[in-house]
Structures are given as structure tokens and as C-alpha cells.
Amino acid sequence: MTKNTTWNKAAVSAEERRCQKGHKPCLLWYTGLSGSGKSTIANAVDRRLFEMGFHTYLLDGDNLRQGINRDLEFSEADRIENIRRTTEVARLFVDAGVIVGAALISPFRAYRAQARELAGKSFIEVFVDTPLSVCEKRDPKGLYKKARAGLIPDFTGINSPYEAPEHPDILLKAAELSIDECVEKVITYLEGYGIVE
């Protein structure tokens, strides 16, 4: 904790924000390999929830690395800091009563556990489980090709491991399901837990 600071309690309570917005806030943490469909699915869920009248915001890993996290590389220390900053920003949105999506590879279980600990009860881990072979075939950004050529060190799935979640809150087999089917699974989960009605 930073010295000489005190957490100031907001004049508007979390319950007041929930009542105003008509839903509970949460953090949907999408994890999976590059090219797994995280951002596509997260955007589709965000669009559906928005159309249903709920208050949402999506934090995309690539977008964050062009702004608040632009000073970070892909070393282990920088990856940890990337997760920490993203989670802290997400916490602010959750505190504001928003349903937040965060789409990041977040390859290591310990990093995701750190995010869950920081975010608390609002954290929902969504594993976009797409086989490496499918992700590499898609390769929308050409990153796998560069990694195979040795141009990208520490690339997740090629020369750096991805530790799949052992017990994700939501499992999306994105190579077997359509985008709409993935969206429905997320919405059904949120309805089942009383986050949206």
C-alpha cells in the first residue's frame, strides 16, 4: 500500500449502483491462446449485453498495451504487471457497477489467481479453449509464423507455455461452438448466478 494515503469511501454505495443499473457488476476474464477467439467472443458478449440494456465495458489486452500498458514488454515481470494493472482498472469499472470483460492471454495460472484475488467475488474466469493447431492455422496477426521463424521470443504456445485453467467458471470450446453459442453460454451463466435477469 502506498504511504500517506487512505482509501476514501464513496458516497454512492455498490447497492445503489446495482439498483440504478439493473444488474450486478462482474469481471469476465477471458483467457486462451492467441487466435483462440477471446476478443471476438468478448466483443460479441459485450454487444449482446449492451443490446439487453446492461452497462458494460471491454478491456482488450492489445488495446491496453497501446495505452496504459504501452511501457510493458513480454518478460515475466512485465506480464505480471500487465495483469495487475488490467485488474486494477477492471476493479474500478466493477466498483462503478459495470459488467467488465477483460480479454488477455494471461498464460500462467498464478497470474490469473493474482487477478482473481485482486478482483474478489466479481471475478469470472472464461477459458476460450481452442487447440493450438487451430489457433496457429487461423493466425490472424501472423504471430505464430513469426514465432516459428524465431522472430518473437517467449511467444505463448510456441516457446513459452500456456497453463490452461483447471477449473474455469465458464468453458468455451470455441473450435466446436459458433460465436453465438459461446455468447449464449456466457449469458446463461450470468443469468444463473443472478448477475443479469
Image (cartoon, helix red, strand yellow):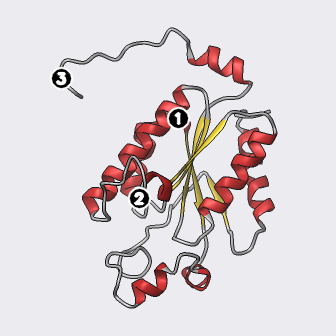
Specify the label residue 121 is tagged with.
1
User: Percent position (x, y) of residue 113?
Assistant: 41, 49
Crowd band around label 3 with a 10 angstrom C-alpha radius: few (<14), some (14–19), many (20+): few
Residue type, mark 2 in image = Arg
Query: Which residue position holds label 3?
Result: 3
At mark 2, the secondary structure is helix
Residue type, mark 3 in image = Lys
- Res 174 quadrant in image: bottom right
Task: Tell me which residue sits at (42%, 85%) in the image.
Answer: 146
Residue type, mark 1 in image = Lys
Task: Tell me which residue sits at (36%, 45%) in the image.
Answer: 84
Q: CA distance from mark 3 to mark 1?
A: 27 Å
At mark 3, the secondary structure is loop
- Res 137 quadrant in image: bottom right
Specify the label residue 109 is tagged with.
2
Mark 2 or mark 3: which is in front? 3
Lower sequence index among marks 2 and 1: 2
Lower sequence index among marks 2 and 3: 3
Specify the label residue 172 is tagged with.
none
